[in-house]
Amino acid sequence: MEKRSINHSRIIQTRLVLPPDTNHLDTIFGGKVLAYIDEVAALSAMKHAGGVVVTASIDSVSFLSSAKVGDALTMEAFVTYTGRSSMEVYVKVTAHDIAKDEEMLTTESFVTMVAVDENGKPRPVSQVYPETEEERKLHESAPARKKHRESRSHI
Ligand SMILES: CC(C)(COP(=O)(O)OP(=O)(O)OC[C@H]1O[C@@H](n2cnc3c(N)ncnc32)[C@H](O)[C@@H]1OP(=O)(O)O)[C@@H](O)C(=O)NCCC(=O)NCCS
């Protein structure tokens, strides 16, 4: 299978934070952000794999700052590493207060997606290669994260 660049899988998605997405402090629910992370990671992995994927795991997520009503919340995702059928996807979430032109990092996460066939069984994916310094760092550090993941799960 032909290798694909990390950049090929890049997805950037921006959403406006609206009142139904928020708690009584007018800041976004963590679960809402997790759902966005899962969706954008799936889109990125689907682009790389050229087909259906399922979420195998989401690494621990810490919320560093909150997004409030009226902020633009941007999710950026790309595949950093591939196994036989699994893909590690890096997701970065930032909140932008457009009126003040202030941008804050909300969270970062790594999601493992697995490409599956029509029977839901894992199927092979192309390998991925980095081009930029940021991509190279994430690509090279991925095997250690995979090992850590395997050590804390039953896989
Ligand atoms: C993910 C899933 C397809 C793995 O199927 P499986 O029969 O266990 O297949 P394997 O053991 O061969 O694993 C396939 C790949 O997934 C990876 N994997 C499996 N479970 C994993 C986990 N919890 N975290 C990270 N990677 C995982 C394996 O390391 C393997 O990677 P590789 O092919 O790159 O070497 C299967 O467990 C599944 O369908 N889970 C439900 C997914 C789902 O419905 N998600 C939505 C939320 S409920």
Image: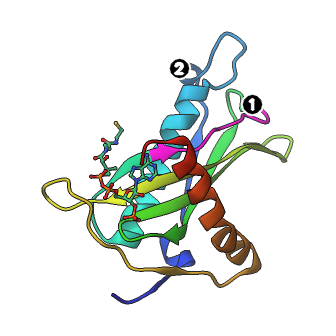
Q: Residue furthest left?
A: 119
Q: Position of residue 139 (x, y in %)?
A: 63, 72
Cβ(mark 1) to ligand 1 < 8 Å?
no
Taking the magenta stretch, the answer to whether it contains residue 61 is yes
Which region is colored magenta? 57-65
Question: Magenta stretch: residue 44 in it?
Answer: no
Q: CA distance from mark 1 to mark 2?
A: 15 Å
What residue sits right under mark 2 in the picture? 20
Helix, strand or loop: magenta stretch = loop
Kindly identify the amino acid type of the residue bearing the numbered disc 1: Ser
Front label number (1 vs 2): 1
User: From what the image shows, is residue 58 above or below residue 81?
Assistant: above
The residue that disc 1 covers is 66
Measuring 60% from the left and 23% from the top, which residue is drawn there?
29
**Taking 74 as reference, is 79 above or below it?**
below
Closer to the camera in the image, 43 or 102:
43
Question: On the picture, is 131 further left or further right than 124?
Answer: right
Q: Place residue 49 in its image quadrant.
A: bottom left
Q: Residues within 10 Å of mark 2 (few under 14, many from 20)?
A: few
Residue 146 image offset from top left, x and y in percent: 56, 58
The quadrant where residue 142 appears: bottom right
Percent position of residue 92, x then y: 66, 52
Q: Is residue 34 left or right of residue 125?
A: right
Q: Which color scheme does this rendered protein use?
A: rainbow
Which class describes the residues within 10 Å of circle 1: few (<14), some (14-19), or many (20+)? some
* Residue type highlighted by circle 2: Pro
